[in-house]
Image: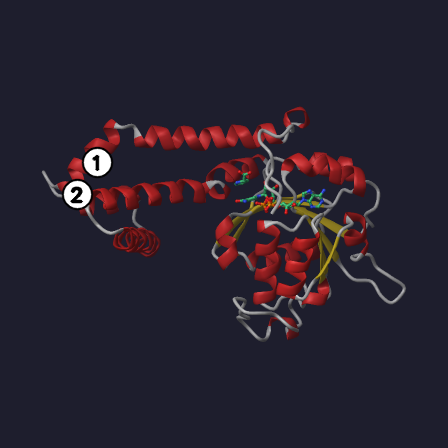
Amino acid sequence: MSITSGFELETASELERSDNPLRNARLSFIGCGVMAEAIIAGLLRRRLVTPDQIIGSHPRQARRDELAAKYAIRVVESNRDAVSFGRSTDQGRFSSIVVLAVKPQRLNLIFEELRGRLQEEQLVLSIIAGARMETIARELLHPAVVRTMPNTPAQIGQGMTVWTATPQVTDAQRDQVRALLGALGKEMYVEEERMIDMATALSATGPTYIFLVMEALIDAGVHLGFSRRMAQELVLQTMLGSVLFAQESHKHPAELRNMVTSPGGTSAEAIYQMEKGSLRTVLSKAVWAAYQRAVALGRAEKNSPKSEEHNS
Ligand SMILES: NC(=O)C1=CN([C@@H]2O[C@H](COP(=O)(O)OP(=O)(O)OC[C@H]3O[C@@H](n4cnc5c(N)ncnc54)[C@H](O)[C@@H]3O)[C@@H](O)[C@H]2O)C=CC1
Ligand SMILES: O=C(O)[C@@H]1CCC=N1
């Protein structure tokens, strides 16, 4: 296996383990942008699959070459060819997962290309915001569908993915999904599909809220007179330490906040200003708006692009 720099293998034994549910799987990635690459990298890093078990499709030659060189996987132009890679042949039957990873606005094109072309044993796994399982199953004429909602920290194996499945997805396929998503960080199964739209707003869009707050605090540090480098280090370690503290102490955030807040002190002063500026309401409104947008993306009539998609 030839994998180039910046890409390190973690465990050596996953592939050999007989309980690795993905050891005989074939994975086809329809659309190889940021999120598909995060999944591919995570699977290879954890050695859950080898590069020859993966195929991707992408419209741009330069991107196909880039991914093929970086991960030693096959990347083709045709989505139909990518899906056929997972088909069982005379040489043997193997499980196959077709990962839909295009932007929501491109989904109708994918439906047209792939409708009726999937075999019964193939599993469709979508990461597309808003796209409902019922729609995917109906449009592809294929009932076994998993809907997932990852987030970008998946790129370093620290993601949070929420997922659900149609009743036609078998227990063996569910084990495969758990293994696949586990390569990205934490995974959480939910029964109700509406929770995927809720997770889209909270955990999948979540890094946006955190990075905006991070950026604002760094700017505030620069305003005080710190160099940008110093402000960034102070803010990042404070955020990281606070998250780990909350995780390890199992205390309510309000209790942890009270520990910092002495009577008449600096934190009380800062909290007063944040409440006065309606920070909680703004965050709550942002999450609610993201949720409504996720729901709207799922409605076919609202699938027209709001802005031009970047072609990464
Ligand atoms: N970026 C994020 O934080 C998250 C994104 N998602 C979902 O993941 C999906 C992909 O998002 P990203 O990877 O961020 O987008 P991206 O734009 O990086 O990737 C999509 C890729 O699909 C390619 N593409 C366009 N038309 C195509 C076609 N007809 N056939 C094959 N490939 C085609 C594009 O060139 C692009 O490289 C979206 O549906 C999004 O809702 C889900 C969770 C988090
Ligand atoms: O804005 C978006 O489309 C993506 C989907 C989930 C988070 N961000």
Within 10 angstroms of label 1, few (less than 14), some, or many (20 or more) residues?
some
Q: How much space separates mark 2 and mark 1, taking CA atoms?
A: 9 Å
Label for residue 271? 1
Left or right: 310 as drawn, with respect to 123: left
For the residue with label 1, is its CB less than 8 Å from the closest atom of ligand 2?
A: no
Instruction: Kindly identify the residue that appears in the image at 62 percent across and 30 percent down.
Output: 305
SS assignment at label 1: helix
Q: Quadrant of residue 173?
A: bottom right
The reply to whether callout 2 and callout 1 are in contact (CB within 8 Å) is: yes
User: Nearest the camera: 43 or 41?
Assistant: 41
Q: Residue at x 60, y 71 (%)?
A: 14
Q: On residue 261, which mark appears?
A: 2
State the residue in front, 218 or 205: 218
In the image, what residue type sits under mark 2?
Thr
Percent from the top left, x then y, of residue 1? 66, 73
Classify residue 274 as left or right of residue 200: left
Residue at image coords 67%, 48% = 31
Answer whether residue 84 is visible to the viewer in this image. yes
Total marks placed: 2
Q: Seen from this angle, which residue lies furthest top?
A: 301
- For this orientation, the residue located farthest to the left is 264
Give the quadrant of residue 113: top right
What percent of the width, then of the height, locates residue 293?
54, 29
Q: Secondary structure at mark 2?
A: loop
- Disc with the residue nearer the chain's start (2 vs 1): 2
Q: Quadrant of ligand 2?
A: top right
